[in-house]
Amino acid sequence: MRILIADDEAMSRRLLQKTLERAGYQVCTAENGRQAADILCSLDGPKLALLDWMMPLLNGPGVCREVRKAKEQSYIYMVLLTSKEAKEDIVAGLESGADDYLVKPFDTAELKARLRTGLRILDLEDRLVEAREDMRFKASHDTLTTLWNRGVILELMGQELSRSHRENATTVVVLCDLDHFKAVNDSFGHLVGDEVLRETAKRLLASVRSYDFVGRYGGEEFLVVLNNCDPAFAFARAEEIRNTIAQRPVKTSGGPVSVTISLGLLLSHEWATRSVEELLHEADKALYGAKEAGRNCVKLAKPKAAASVSEYRVREPVKQRR
Amino acid sequence: MKEAEQASPCQIFDRGELLARVENDCELLGDIITIFKEDFPSHLHDLREAVKARDGKSVAIAAHTLKGMLSNLAAAQAASSVARLEQMGCQGDSQGFDEAFAAFEDDASKVIPLLEACMAEECR
C-alpha cells in the first residue's frame, strides 16, 4: 500500500519513512501542505496519508479540506500528526476531513495499529465500490453476452437518433436475428446455443467501430446502432456484419456450428423524427423481409414503399419467423 | 545494537524511548541524529532572531519545529523548555522570551553530546 508522509521537518519525515517502509508501505513524501494536496488529488495518488498539522503553504487540516473537496470517487484515509492535544484542536482537525489523529511524538506500535485501521477502511471501500460497479454492470448489460441489455441499447439508440437529427447526420439501425436458432438449440442443446449467442455477440462487437453500440434485443435478436454513419456505406456495413457471422462456423463444445444472420436496416435520415418504437417497428419489418427473402441477407426499411407497409401490417409472431 | 531496555532514561534524554522509536535500527538512529545536527543550528538561529525581534508568531513557529525534533529524539527537558517558548509566542507574551530562550539554549546544549554518546555506544 502506498502512503504519503507530509511533514516539513526532515528528521520527522525520515523517521516516519523508515518506520513505515519497514512495515511494508511504499512511501512518498511531501515537504509542505500544497505539495501534499497536489499529490493526493492526482489521479494515481496514494490512498493513505500521514499529515503534519503545521506545514508551510497549507496546513494539515487545509490539505484534508482540499482533498475532501476534490475527491469524490476514491476515498483517501488521512491521519493528522499533531502536538496539539486540546480538544478543540482535535475536533477542528477531524472536522476538516481527517479520519484520525496521532499526537507527536508518535508511538511506533500505535502508529502502525492506526494505519491498519485505515487499511481496513480502504479495503472495505474497495469492496463496496467493486460491488457497486458489479451491480451497475449487471443492470446495464446482458448477462450471457455482456452486450448492452435491451433497456440500455434502446436508450442509447434514442440518444443517438436525437443527436443525428440535431446534427443533420445519419444513424444506421440494424436489427439482426440469427437464422434457425431454435434448430441449434434443438440439435445441440441450450448450452451450445448459449455458446453460439456469446460468439455472435463477440463477432458483432468486432465488426463495428468502438463508438457504435451493440445490444441484445431479445433471445437471438441483436440491435446494432452505427453512429454518424455515411448512408452510402450503410448497406456495405450491414453486409460486413452479416458476413462476419456467416463466414466461419462457431466452435462450440458440441462441435462446429454454422449459423447465419438476417438483418433489417434503417437509415434514420429517411424517417424524419419518428420515435424509437416506430423505427424499430420499421427495422423489424425489414428484418422480416430478409427472412422472407431466404435469410442470411440484408433488407433496407423504405419509408415510401406503401406496398411493403401494407404487406407487413400483420406482424408475424417472433417465434414463427426464425 | 543493545536491547532498548538496557538504556537508562534520564531527564535530558531518554535513550530507551529513542531506541524504541527507531526500532533499534542503528542506521536510522544515525540518520536522524545527523539530520538533527545539520538542521538544529538554523532553527535555533530562527528562534533567536524571532526572540530578539519580539515576534511572537515567528517565535511560536520556530519553537514548534524544535519541539517536534526534540520530542522525536526523546529529549524531554529541552522539548519542554521550547514548548514554553512556543506557548509564550502564541500568547504574544514577549516579556519572558529572553529568560525562556536562555533556559532552552542551556537544555538543548546538553542534548547533542548525549545523542553522540548514544550513537557511539549503540552502534559500535
Image: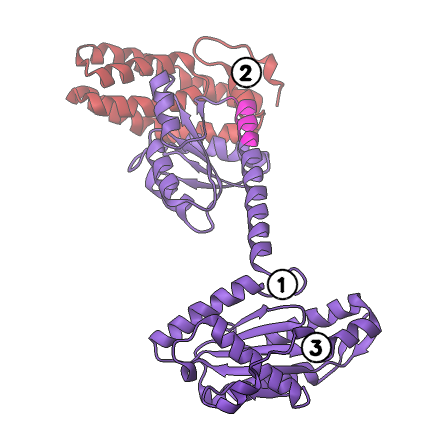
The crowd level at tag 1 (other Cα within 10 Å; few <14, some 14-19, many 20+) is some
Q: Where in the figure is residue A124, as x and y percent of width and height?
A: 57, 38
Label 3 chain ID: A
Disc 1/disc 3 C-alpha distance (Å): 27 Å
Mark 3 secondary-structure assignment: helix
| Quadrant (top left, top right, bottom left, bottom right) of the C terminus of chain A | bottom right
Residue located 63% across and 88% down the image: A297
Question: Looking at the image, which residue is at 18% across and 14% down?
Answer: B94
Colour in which the image shows chain A = purple
The amino acid beneath tag 2 is: Gly
Q: Chain in red?
A: B
Question: Is B90 situated above or below A9?
Answer: above
For the question of whether residue A254 can be seen, the reply is no
**Callout 3 amino acid:** Gln
Evaluate whether residue A309 shows in this view: yes
Q: Which residue is mark 1?
A: A146
Q: Are marks 1 and 3 in contact (CB under 8 Å)?
A: no
Which residue is label 2 attached to?
B16
The magenta span reads A107-117
Residue shown at 24% from the left, 22% from the top: B59
Q: Nearer the viewer, residue A58 or A293?
A: A293
